[in-house]
Image (cartoon, grey):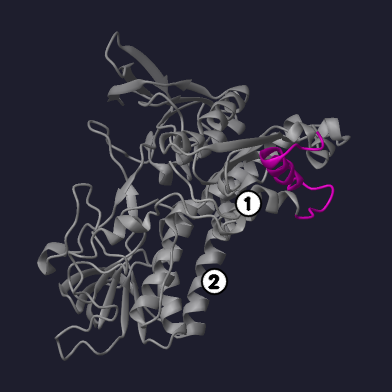
Amino acid sequence: MAMASISRRKATTVFSSWRHLYSNNSSKYSWIVSRGYSVSSGSDENDVVVIGGGPGGYVAAIKAAQLGLKTTCIEKRGALGGTCLNVGCIPSKALLHSSHMYHEAKHSFASHGVKLSSVEVDLPAMMAQKDKAVGNLTKGIEGLFKKNKVNYVKGYGKFLSPSEVSVETVEGGNTVVKGKNIIIATGSDVKSLPGITIDEKRIVSSTGALALSEVPKKLIVIGAGYIGLEMGSVWGRLGSEVTVVEFAADIVPTMDGEVRKQFQRSLEKQKMKFMLKTKVVSVDTEGNGVKLTVEPAAGGDQTTLEADVVLVSAGRVPFTAGLELDKIGVETDKAGRILVNHRFGTNVSGVYAIGDVIPGPMLAHKAEEDGVACVEYIAGKEGHVDYDLVPGVVYTHPEVASVGKTEEQVKALGVDYRVGKFPFLANSRAKAIDDAEGVVKVLAEKETDKILGVHIMAPNAGELIHEAVLALNYGASSEDIARTCHAHPTMSEALKEAAMATYDKPIHI
């Protein structure tokens, strides 16, 4: 790939954005304006109606109200925050932290001079702490609605027309909410597998895995993605024997290959077992436990695995059930995702969609960005989301965080590049706290030194990654990070050293 000879800080963008995925629909839906008023004269009660109160929906509702638009948010759960807050991101991080504290107390405190006579798990207390965090945050969003004057309707919404939503309220009644612009923000649901029925007791989704009444002796996780590895980590730390069954050849296939290999080795040291290239053939729930019949993905002899609990974590799918999109003619793709243009408009004037129901990463923070941008377009402003710069984080220990391109993607695009790496074993802060497993990897375009991707495996990698996100957002070079003064001693110095290794040489290795 030929690159223009330009300065590092003005380097030409070498990769197309996820935005193009939306823009490809622009010509088809070019007649959709940013503020699509319905022809119904009775639809002027709300400027914006948001169906769904998850990260995308509640953020869109608040932003709309802040922009002076009369706004109503409809949420079927009766509690704001969506899957993320109620049965996803937040409760899982609460349990990840609690289980890590237990693991540290049991295995690491003594080496730091903290001696305990005994350490035991109080699972009900752990779950209570998780529930308290969820409850407080949910109430906090309701408070934000009141502060910003967002009308909140608790119930299940479905379209009557492009400007009317019928809501079956949680109290048992029914009401019709009218709006000039309606945003679909109903999120996603657990992807089911053929022949496997989730009962949230012995065969659980992430929802059930967050509410187990006891620590299973043996846990089988189907799927080696973010959620499966996080929940496997929780119960593994608390004493479960965890086996992860994955159809693909690798765990977390979107992760940089070199980092992924180190990450898998780390999890294996934590006694997590992996069966890759393996297909689940059937599940037998007769008796007290669960029996899984598996075989090689390419075919071969079958084997039987036994577990107390099986977690189905094979991904998520858009949740649009009951919306009656067909009634108003909203178009979807084969995966059930709603097709939108670059302004988040569907093929139906005045109807928009954001978050997990449209193409793109199924991440809470991506949905939030969608929500803000969509509402800005509706208000006649310019919205912006760069899907190339959405960070991803696996919240295990160590964490793995990334932004931009993997080395495999850079190679596939034929870009000449440099790689700089720095291990946390050479980082002063990591050594001081005796938590030095991990690495920072920086990829930069060879001619201009523009950063193309950053991958971090480390404690708190999810916090460290945002310096890289900001750098990529401003088109920074690796030298820009390397010449930025970083406080000492901090974990973030590892990113500085990796950047130094990219354009020149590191100091501390």
Question: Which quadrant is home to the N terminus?
Answer: top left
Q: Earlier in the sequence, mark 1 or mark 2?
A: 2
Q: Which residue is mark 1?
A: 477
Q: Do residues under tags 1 and 2 come within 8 Å of each other at their CB atoms?
A: no
Give how far across and how far down residue 139 sits, in percent: 52, 70
Q: How many marks?
A: 2
Q: Nearer the viewer, residue 442 or 431?
A: 442
Q: Nearer the viewer, residue 154 or 318?
A: 318
Give the amino acid type for the residue marked by disc 1 in the picture: Ser
Give how far across and how far down residue 496 sits, in percent: 73, 46
Q: Secondary structure at mark 1?
A: loop
Q: Nearer the viewer, residue 216 or 18?
A: 18
Examine the rendered structure and indicate whether residue 238 appears above or below residue 488: above
- Residue shown at 49% from the left, 37% from the top: 255
State which mark lies toward you, 1 or 2.
1
Give the amino acid type for the residue marked by disc 2 in the picture: Gly
Q: Secondary structure at mark 2?
A: helix
- Check if residue 275 falls in the magenta segment: no
Give how far across and how far down residue 205 sits, in percent: 38, 41
Q: Which residue is mark 2?
A: 140
Quarter-wise, where is residue 137 in the image? bottom right
- Residue shown at 63% from the left, 23% from the top: 269
Question: Which region is colored magenta?
Answer: 484-508
Q: Relative to 119, is 454 on the left or the right? A: left
Query: Quick one: which residue is furthest to the top in this view?
Result: 301
- Check if residue 503 falls in the magenta segment: yes
Quarter-wise, where is residue 386 in the image? bottom left
Question: Which quadrant is home to the C terminus?
Answer: top right
- Residue shown at 31% from the left, 23% from the top: 280
Query: What distance separates the C-alpha of mark 1 from that of mark 2?
Result: 40 Å
